C-alpha cells in the first residue's frame, strides 16, 4: 500500500545545463513508470530549470536543504516558501553530511521539517548511525533520538508529508551497502518507533527509504524487503543508465522465489 519512492540526491554535482540534460534523459526513459514516485534533488542553482525540464514527466524536484524561516535576515539561506515558489515539492533534511560537516542538530532539523510542512512541502527526513555508533551498540539509541527529536511536535496528519530515509553513515559513498537483512532490521525498528510516537496508521503509511551505496546491482534485494519502501541514491543517481535501472527495480510480484 506504500507506493515506492526512488529518489536521487545529486549533492554538489552538475551545472544547470548538465542537470537539465540528465532530467530530460530520465524523463524520456521513465515516462511509463507510474507505480513508483521518482524524485531528484539537484543543487539550488539548477532547481528552477530542473522543474521546467521535469514538467509533464513523473519526476518531482526536491531541494537538498532549506532554512527554517520563510523570510528574514538570514544571509545565504533559502526558505521552503521560496522552494515552493519555483515548483519544488519538498526538500531533503537531516542528511548525515549536514549533520557532520555543518553541525546540524536534531532540534535544528526538526525546525526545518516543521517549516517545510508549514509551506505545504514534503520533508525527506534522513537519519542514520555512524560505524562507531553501530559497533559500540548505540545504534538503536541514536536512531531513537534522531526520530523522536527530529519529528517532535508533529501530529499524525503532519506525517502524511514526511518520508523517512535511513542512511547508515558507514554505507554512504563507501560502496559498502548494508545487507538486505541489516537494512530491513533497521527499517522495522524505525517503523516501530513511528508506531510508538504516533500510531499504527502512521507507521503503516510512512515511506521509509534506504540510502547508502544503492546501485543497479543491489536495489532489487533491498526493495524486496518488507519495510523498505524506496531508496535515496547518491553517486548512482548521477549516471542516467544507473538511476533508470534503479527506478526500474524488480517489482515484488515478479521477484523469483
Ligand atoms: P551514495 O549512494 O553515493 O552512497 O550516497 C547516499 C546518500 O547520501 C544519499 O543521500
Image (cartoon, rainbow, N blue to C red):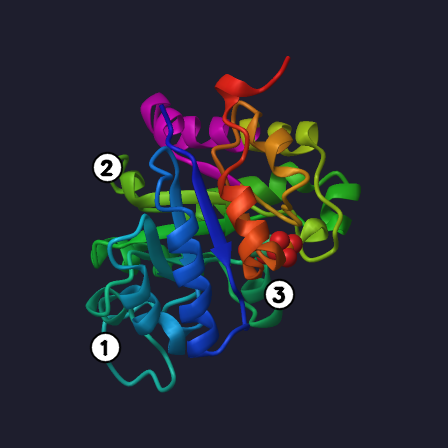
Quadrant containing the N terminus is top left
Between discs 1 and 3, the one toward the N terminus: 1
| Prevalent SS, magenta region | helix
As helix, strand or loop, the secondary structure at mark 3 comes to helix
Quarter holding residue 43: bottom left
Task: Say which residue appears at 21% left-offset and 59% top-offset.
Answer: 119
As helix, strand or loop, the secondary structure at mark 2 comes to loop
Q: Splitting the image into four quadrants, where does ligand 1 fall?
A: bottom right
Q: Which mark is residue 100?
A: 3
Left or right for 185, reference 63: right
Task: Say which residue appears at 53% left-offset and 58% top-offset.
Answer: 95
The image position of residue 52, as x and y in percent, is 27, 67
Number of residues whose C-alpha sits closer than 10 Å to that of mark 2, classed few (under 14), some (14–19) or many (20 or more): few
Between discs 2 and 3, the one toward the N terminus: 3
Q: Is residue 145 visible?
A: no
Q: Label 2, label 3: how many angstroms apart (C-alpha)?
A: 30 Å
Q: Label 2, label 1: how many angstroms apart (C-alpha)?
A: 25 Å
Q: Is residue 214 visible?
A: yes
Task: Say which residue appears at 35% left-offset and 40% top-offset.
Answer: 32
Whether tag 2 and tag 3 are in contact, CB under 8 A, the answer is: no
Query: Residue under circle 1?
Result: 71
Query: Mark 1 near ligand 1 (CB under 8 Å)?
Result: no
Q: Label 1, label 3: how many angstroms apart (C-alpha)?
A: 26 Å
The image position of residue 170, as x and y in percent, is 72, 51
Magenta residues, as a range?
189-209
Is 21 in front, or is 164? 21
Whether tag 2 and tag 1 are in contact, CB under 8 A, the answer is: no
Q: Is 205 contained in the magenta span?
A: yes
Quarter holding residue 109: bottom left
Query: Residue under circle 2?
Result: 157
Is 73 in front, or is 49? 49
Amino acid at each position: 500500500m506504500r507506493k515506492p519512492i526512488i529518489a536521487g540526491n545529486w549533492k554538489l554535482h552538475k551545472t544547470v545545463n548538465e542537470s537539465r540534460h540528465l532530467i530530460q534523459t530520465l524523463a524520456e526513459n521513465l515516462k511509463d513508470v507510474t507505480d513508483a514516485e521518482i524524485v531528484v534533488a539537484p543543487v539550488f542553482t539548477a532547481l528552477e530549470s530542473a522543474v521546467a525540464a521535469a514538467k509533464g514527466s513523473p519526476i518531482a524536484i526536491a531541494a537538498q536543504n532549506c532554512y527554517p524561516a520563510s523570510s528574514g535576515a538570514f544571509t545565504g539561506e533559502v526558505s521552503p516558501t521560496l522552494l515552493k515558489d519555483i515548483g519544488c515539492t519538498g526538500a531533503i533534511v537531516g542528511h548525515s553530511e549536514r549533520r557532520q560537516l555543518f553541525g546540524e542538530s536534531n532540534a535544528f532539523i526538526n525546525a526545518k521539517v516543521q517549516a517545510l510542512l508549514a509551506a505545504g512541502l514534503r520533508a525527506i527526513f534522513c537519519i542514520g548511525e555512524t560505524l562507531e555508533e553501530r559497533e559500540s551498540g548505540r545504534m538503536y539509541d541514536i536512531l531513537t533520538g534522531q526520530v523522536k527529536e527530529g519529528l517532535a511536535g508533529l501530529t499524525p496528519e503532519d506525517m502524511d508529508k514526511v518520508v523517512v530515509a535511513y542512511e547508515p553513515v558507514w554505507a554512504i559513498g563507501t560502496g559498502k551497502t548494508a545487507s538486505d537483512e541489516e537494512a530491513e532490521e533497521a527499517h522495522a525498528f524505525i517503523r516501530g518507533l513511528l508506531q510508538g510516537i504516533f500510531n499504527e496508521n502512521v507507521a503503516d503509511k510512512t515511506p521509509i527509504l534506504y540510502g547508502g551505496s544503492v546501485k543497479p546491482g543491489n536495489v532489487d534485494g533491498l526493495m524486496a524487503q518488507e519495510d523498505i519502501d524506496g531508496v535515496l541514491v547518491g553517486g548512482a543517481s548521477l549516471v542516467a543508465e544507473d538511476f533508470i535501472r534503479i527506478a526500474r527495480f524488480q517489482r515484488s510480484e515478479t521477484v523469483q522465489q
